[in-house]
Image (cartoon, rainbow, N blue to C red):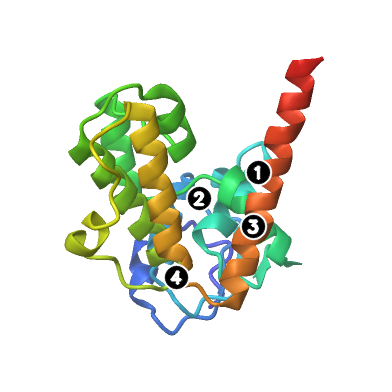
Amino acid sequence: MTLSVNSIFTLEPLSHCQNLTELYLRKNNISNLCELYYLKQLPRLKILWLSENPCCGTDPHKYRMTVIRNLPNLQKLDNQAVTEEEVAQSMTEGENITTTPSENLENTENGQLETTADQTSAEATSETDTDLLNFSMEETNKIREQLGMKPLPRDKFSSFSSPVEGNGSRKKRNNILNAVLLLLKDLDKEGLEIVQRTAGNRLHQLQKKELQQDR
């Protein structure tokens, strides 16, 4: 579908085009990357051209990582092929869009700034067991949704929750770890390879950081 140079400002009407495989949106008025929320509902979308819209911003790398993270099935973005390495990289360097533009605006106005899982883990020092369980289950199901999997029911996830003993940080780490382990069971070979590369990159970053601190 070619819609370039059409003064389009929202992608909501496209969310119902389930058979859409190619979408050309150059030189429109799409100002918010949260519009990608509507494209996440298109399972067959393989080619997207979104450049020269206000939402692309001033950081091309951040823009590309965010688009790929939310649309991991894309084969080509802005006339450039999407690689497996970029898909893996986007999981740590792209922003995960979980709300519509209007919902995101409401949250911002109410001072409810969204944080990533890493920010939450670093900043939160004490939470109830229920909060920790909801956090892990929600994150797990978000990832499963991106990969086309069915969400896990609460009762299945609860059996993997960490024991009550231990401090908040330890319980959070255990719950996140359990969430990852649950996800791994349903991944195919390609998915596992992406996780392996992402984990390797993350481990390399942590090791590099430790070396710098030791100097």
Q: CA distance from mark 2 to mark 4?
A: 42 Å
Give the mark, 4 or 3, whose residue is nearer the N terminus: 3
Q: CA distance from mark 4 to mark 3?
A: 18 Å
- Rendered residue at 30%/45% (across/down): 162
Q: Is residue 169 visible?
A: yes
Question: Which of the two discs, 2 and 4, labels the residue nearer the N terminus?
Answer: 2
**Mark 1 nearby-residue class (10 Å; few <14, some 14–19, many ≥20):** some
* 10 left or right, relative to 68: left
Q: Residues within 10 Å of mark 3 (few under 14, many from 20)?
A: many
Horizontal side of 187 relative to 144 (left or right) equals right
Q: Which residue is mark 3?
A: 88
Residue with the mark numbered 1: 202
Say which residue label 2 marks. Answer: 29
Residue furthest to the right in view is 215
Identity of the amino acid at label 4? Answer: Lys
Q: Which residue is mark 4?
A: 185
Assign a secondary structure to mark 3: helix
The residue lying furthest to the top in this view is 215
